[in-house]
Amino acid sequence: MRAAYIEQLGPPEAIRYGELPTPQPGPNDVLVDVEVATVNHVDTFVRSGAWRTPVEFPFVIGRDLVGRVAAAGPGAPGFAVGDRVWCNSLGHGGRQGAAAEKAVVPADRLYHLPDGVEPGDAVALAHPAATAYLALFTHGRMRAGDTVVVLGAAGNVGAAVVVMAAEAGARVIAVAGPRDAEYCRSLGAAEVIDYRDPDVPGRVLRASPGGVDLHVDTAAHNDLDAAVGLLAKRGRIVLLAGMRTRPVLPVGPLYLKDCSVVGFAISQATTAELSEAATAINRLLADGRLRPRRTRSLPLSEAAEAHRAVEAGEAHGIRLVLHT
């Protein structure tokens, strides 16, 4: 089979495209004919070694795929040949990746794709939407009636956060660029604040005088001093990006309001957490509520170029979809 793979950790130029043996599924696995894959920032961290995780060379890159079931082991009930499926947790933790013509997926990491959903849309949303769900519900403990402030609300993860929070009954304050204001409102934001405004915290508090219940910074600025000042009693801050940031935490104001800060990486999510997120994502995909804003298609043979573009910031706000 043809695949995008590396033989050692390194820059995008380390990615090769060529023939590898077809992987063999175990009894609890599903062999998938891959239609589309994509590139996430975390894929570049794995490839470069910035984030260390077990890999076996030659290592097929990539986490996310949409495809059709080619074969299912006896321990993979519910999957039949021809079923269209998706996954967002390959390519780390000792698992080979998705950027190939065929991939082996453990049955508990594979989900059916709803009828009528475009594969390119689904693969573009697989990672950011799951991240958004984990931020809001698994770690942020969001409930209907909460006020949620979302920084970077027009980005891939941020937009999914806005959609999911609003759909679940939260009041969303979006922080984004002025040209993205209408887009954020179309996703469900009640208020949109220009991120360039020198008094963003003041504007957030004027929009929510009692403070916010949940603060999600998808832009990875992680200004905890400002964030803690925005929190209502027992408010929560969820950290999900900005691996190299080192902010100062104002401990006194934090604990005096019974507030908390929690961080998570989607790579640490359990299969049960990912499955719960997938159920919500499928529902919103089927309803048409979740859609990628911009995608760009590339052949799988250009995986190295896709990694280079993501690292260089040239794919900002665009999901790169790799077609096999």
Image (cartoon, rainbow, N blue to C red):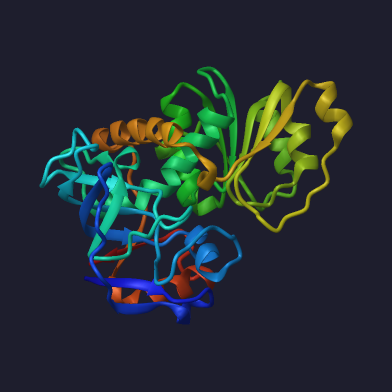
- In the image, taking residue 203 as reference, residue 283 lies left or right, namely left
Query: In the rendered view, would you say 179 is above or below 307?
Result: above
Please state the horizontal and vertical placement of residue 313, each as a whole percent of the image: 53, 68
Q: Quadrant of the C terminus?
A: bottom left
Residue in the foreground of this view, choosing between 25 and 119:
25
Please state the horizontal and vertical placement of residue 322, each as a whole percent of the image: 30, 65
Residue in the foreground of this view, choosing between 37 and 191:
37
- In the image, taking residue 291 as reference, residue 113 lies left or right, namely left
Query: In the rendered view, would you say 45 is above or below 215?
Result: below
Q: Residue at x 29, y 76 (%)?
A: 301
Please state the horizontal and vertical placement of residue 242, each as a whole percent of the image: 65, 54
User: Which image quadrant is residue 98 in?
Assistant: bottom left
User: Which image quadrant is residue 213 in?
Assistant: top right
The outermost residue toward the left is 82
Query: In the rendered view, would you say 215 is above or below 23?
Result: above
- In the image, taking residue 313 as reference, residue 23 lies left or right, namely left
Q: Residue at x 38, y 48 (%)?
A: 88
Work out whether residue 298 can be spotted: yes
Please state the horizontal and vertical placement of residue 282, each as a whole percent of the image: 29, 35
Residue in the foreground of this view, choosing between 245 and 90:
90
Q: Quadrant of the N terminus?
A: bottom left
In this rendering, the count of numbered labels is: 0
- In the image, taking residue 154 as reference, residue 219 lies left or right, namely right
Work out whether residue 183 can be spotted: no
Residue in the foreground of this view, choosing between 89 and 114:
89
Q: Residue at x 51, y 28 (%)?
A: 137
The outermost residue toward the bottom is 13
